[in-house]
Image (cartoon, rainbow, N blue to C red):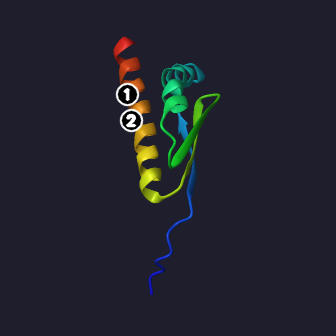
Amino acid sequence: MIDETPLESVKSNISVEFESPAQAKIIYDAIILEFETAPDFRSSMTIELDGREILINIDAEDSTSFRASVNSAIKWIKLALEINNLTN
């Protein structure tokens, strides 16, 4: 039998590793404002820089808002990387 109890929350810690600490800092600086100003009605995201890694913490009320938060984080990082690659 499938348990139909709704999720109380979904939490995740995501680590994105870059080629160098310098590249991680460039991407971090490019996306930090997005994380700080993202609407947080049903989820919250924090971001930290740790050497050549960016650590993303997501806490969402449900799977839909969790998925939206993950998609936003990936989109922002991908866009920042593409722009960085164009300028190098």
Q: Residue 26 location, x and y as percent? A: 52, 19
Query: Looking at the figure, which quarter contains the C terminus?
Result: top left
**Quarter-of-image position of residue 76:** top left
Disc 1 + disc 2, Cβ < 8 Å = yes
How far apart are the alpha carbons under marks 1 and 2? 6 Å
| Residue that numbered label 2 is attached to | 75
Residue beneath the point at 34% across and 16% down: 86
Q: Residue 27 location, x and y as percent? A: 50, 24
Residue beneath the point at 59% across and 33% down: 53
Farthest-out residue, bottom:
1
Say which of 52 and 36 sits in front: 36
Please tell me the numbered disc located at residue 63. Answer: none
Residue beneath the point at 56% across and 64% down: 8
Farthest-out residue, right:
50
| Residue that numbered label 1 is attached to | 79
Q: Helix, strand or loop at disc 2?
A: helix
Residue beneath the point at 52% across and 41% down: 40
Q: Residue 1 location, x and y as percent? A: 45, 87
Q: Residue 49 location, x and y as percent? A: 62, 29
Given the image, on which type of amino acid does mark 2 rest? Lys
Say which of 25 and 12 sits in front: 12
Q: Helix, strand or loop at disc 1?
A: helix
**Quarter-of-image position of residue 50:** top right
Q: Residues within 10 Å of mark 1 (few under 14, many from 20)?
A: some
The tally of labels here is: 2
Q: Residues within 10 Å of mark 2 (few under 14, many from 20)?
A: few
Given the image, on which type of amino acid does mark 1 rest? Leu
Above or below, comparing residue 15 to residue 32 in the picture: below
